[in-house]
Amino acid sequence: MITIYFAAGQSRWQNYEAPLRTALAEAGIIADLSPDCSDPAAVFYIIFAPGGEIEDFTPFSRCKAVLNLWAGVERVVANPTLTQPLCRMVDPALTAGMVEWVLGHTLRHHLGMDRHIINPSRHWEPTCSPIAAERPVTVMGLGALGQACATALQQVGFPVRGWSRTEKQIPGLTTHHGTDGLKAALTDAKTVVLLLPKTPATENILNMETLSFLATGAAILNPGRGHLIDDLALLAALDSGAIGHATLDVFRTEPLPQEHPFWSHPRVTVTPHIAAETRPNSASRVVVDNIRRGEAGQPFLHLVDRDRGY
Amino acid sequence: MITIYFAAGQSRWQNYEAPLRTALAEAGIIADLSPDCSDPAAVFYIIFAPGGEIEDFTPFSRCKAVLNLWAGVERVVANPTLTQPLCRMVDPALTAGMVEWVLGHTLRHHLGMDRHIINPSRHWEPTCSPIAAERPVTVMGLGALGQACATALQQVGFPVRGWSRTEKQIPGLTTHHGTDGLKAALTDAKTVVLLLPKTPATENILNMETLSFLATGAAILNPGRGHLIDDLALLAALDSGAIGHATLDVFRTEPLPQEHPFWSHPRVTVTPHIAAETRPNSASRVVVDNIRRGEAGQPFLHLVDRDRGY
C-alpha cells in the first residue's frame, strides 16, 4: 500500500479520480489515493498542479517524486523547498492535441481561410494560395512537442526549419541553435511556431529585431509561453502589416484581460490556453506509469533538469 | 514540329504560355503552340478547358489526344463528337492543394476555430476538443485525390473510412462501397469529405437519408462537385442542428448566386472553387509529359474511361 496525494485542486480531482483509479488498477498498484493529506511524511508520490495546495515541500520527507500534470514546470521548478525529483507531463494526447492546434492554425493562415469564414459582402474571388511546399515554417523549440509539430508540418509538405537554444541534431530536419542561429532560422519564414519553455534565456525571443527577419505578412503561432513575445513589438509589426497575423494561445496574464489590445486587433486571434490541455485519461496513465517505475526501482521518465529549468 | 492548340481561353493562355513553353523545351519537344487554330486537321494535341472554344471535335481528324486542364471532365466527356482519347489532369500540386484544403478545414471544424476567430464578446472559455483519434472522418470517393486526403487525415490521427461506388481495396484504409455500403461508411462520422466525380450515380448522394447516418453536429466538406449534395436536405439538417457546419467549395451554379441561402447561413462557409485549382507550372509539366508519351508511342497517363465518365 502506497500513499499518493493528489495536490492539484478539487475541481481537477473530479475529472482525475476515476481515470487515476483505473490506471492504478490496470498497473496492479494498490494505493491510498486522496486529495487530502493528514500526514505529509507518509506520502510517497505527489500528483501536482500549481495553484496553492503545496507551497512548502519540506514536510514530504519520504516523497519519491512530484508528478506534474502540466508540461510546463516554471511555477514549481524554482521552489527552493522542492528537493524531490520533479517529472513533467509528457502526455501522448497532449502532444496530439498540440500538433492538431499547430497544424490547423498553420493551414488556416496558409489557406487564408478567414476571408471565407468572414465574408459579409459575398465576394467570390477564386485566388488560390501557393502550395505548402512554397511556404517555409520555423519551429522554435525542439522538445517533444516541437519535434512532433515539425514532423507533422513536414508530412503536409511545408519546408520546416527548427531552432533550439542548444544544438540539436534531428534526422530529416534543418536545425539552427543559439542566438547566432536565430537569423538563419527565421529568415523568410512564412509561419513561426513558438514552443520554447519559459526560461530567462527565451524571454522576448520574438522582438522587434527577430520579427524583422520573417517574410512579409508572416503568421505567428504561440502555443508555448506568453513571455516568448515582446507584445509591443508584435503589435507594431501587425499594425504596419510586416506581420500578417498572430494566433496566440498563451499570455503574460491569463485569462487575457478584457481591455488587452490583442482582443480587438483585427490581425490577432486569441485562443484560451487550449493548445496543450492535458486530457485526464491519458495523463493518468502517464502518472501511474511513473509511480510503477518508482516502485520497481526504475528511473523516472520526463525528469526535469533543475539547472536548465525544464 | 508538332502542332498544339491551346483551347482553354485567352485568360488562361496568359498564365500557361510561359510554363508550357518551358516544359516543352525541357522535354526537347519542338512544337507550334498557339491559342489560335487556322487548320484543325493539322492539330496533333489539344490542351483543353471547357468554355466554348471547341464544341465540335470532328474537324480535328489527326488529333492524338485532348488534354484536359481540369481533374473533372463531365463537361466534355459526353460530347458525341469527341472520339479522340481524353486525358484528365492529375497535377501533383493540385493533389497537394486539395489535401491542404481538406486537412485544414477538417482541423478547423474539429478544433472549433470559428468561435475564436469570431469572438466579439472576448469570451475566455478553455474547453478543448477531444483529440482527432476520437473523431471519425469518412472520405467519399477514393480516386487519386480521395486517397491522398485519406492518408493525410490518418497521419494526423483521424480514424478514416473510405467509400467508393465500386469496390476498392486500399492498404491500411477501411473501405465500403456501393449503395449497400453507404450506411456503414457514414454512421457516426464527425466529418464527411466529398470527392466523388459527377456522374448520374453520385448525384444527391448526400441527401436526407444519408445525412441522418452522421454523428450529430457533423461537418460536411464538399471540394468535389456541387451536385453531390441535395441542397435543400442539407439546409434543413443545418437548420435543425443535426449537421453542425458545411464548408462548400463547389456549387450547382458558379459563382454562387448572391441570393443563394448558403451565403447567409451561419453554419455554411463558401469557398470560391479553390480547393483543386490547377497550378500552371506543375500542370504544364503533366500536359507535356503526355505529349512526350504520345510522340514516343507510349500509352497516355490519366486516360478517361468514356463509359464510366471519369
Image (cartoon, coloured by chain):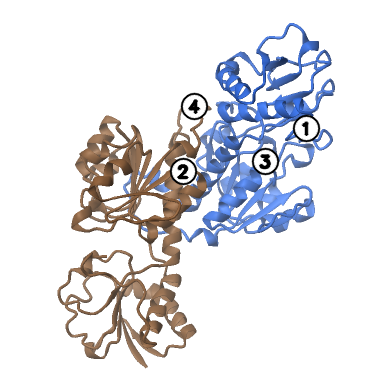
Chain colours: A blue, B brown
Image point (46%, 36%), residue name: B134
**Closer to us: A238 or B185:** B185
Q: CA distance from mark 2 to mark 3?
A: 32 Å
Q: Which amino acid type is shown beneath numbered disc 3?
A: Ile
Circle 3 residues within 10 Å: few <14, some 14–19, many ≥20: many
Quadrant location of the N terminus of chain B in the rendered image: bottom left
Q: Find disc 2 in the rendering and name its residue.
A: B158
User: Could you tell me which chain the residue with mark 2 belongs to?
Assistant: B
Q: Tell me if residue A288 comes above or below residue B219 in the rendering.
A: above
Task: Indicate which disc residue A229 carries.
Answer: 3
Q: Find disc 4 in the rendering and name its residue.
A: B123
Q: Are the residues flagged by discs 2 and 3 from a single subunit?
A: no
Task: Indicate which disc residue A298 carries.
Answer: 1
Q: Are the residues flagged by discs 3 and 4 from a single subunit?
A: no
- Does label 2 or label 4 sit earlier along the sequence? 4
Q: Which amino acid type is shown beneath numbered disc 2?
A: Phe
Q: Which amino acid type is shown beneath numbered disc 1?
A: Gln
User: Could you tell me which chain the residue with mark 4 belongs to?
Assistant: B
Image point (56%, 27%), residue name: A281
Q: Are the residues flagged by discs 1 and 3 from a single subunit?
A: yes
Secondary structure, mark 4, is loop
- In front: label 2 or label 4: 2
Toward which corner of the image does residue B298 lie, by quadrant? Answer: bottom left
